[in-house]
Amino acid sequence: MNLSGKVKSFLDSPKGRQMMDRGRQEMSKPENQRKIRNLMNKVKKGR
């Protein structure tokens, strides 16, 4: 099985769904959205 197949299998598992739900909860927080935007800006400036 290739890497993308393994990732898909994991995300379809109960543990994978749990991690996705946790990620959605964390990304709904304004302070985490701000951190991601700041990181994206740093990456764009580095090009």
Image (spheres, rainbow, N blue to C red):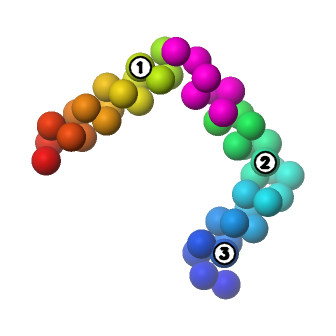
- SS class of the residue under badge 2? helix
Spatial distance from mark 3 to mark 1, Cα to Cα?
A: 32 Å
Magenta span: helix, strand or loop, mainly? helix
Q: Horizontally, is 27 left or right of 15 in the view?
A: left
Q: Say which residue label 2 marks.
A: 17
Viewer-nearest residue: 18 or 24:
24
**Residue type at the position of mark 1:** Arg
Q: Answer above or below: position of 17 versus 5.
A: above
- SS class of the residue under badge 3? helix
- Say which residue appears at 58% left-offset and 75% top-offset: 3
Q: Answer above or below: position of 9 versus 34.
A: below
Q: Horizontally, is 46 left or right of 14 in the view?
A: left
Q: Say which residue label 3 marks.
A: 5
Q: Say which residue label 1 marks.
A: 34
In the rendered image, the residue lying farthest to the bottom is 1
Q: Which residues are magenta?
A: 24-30
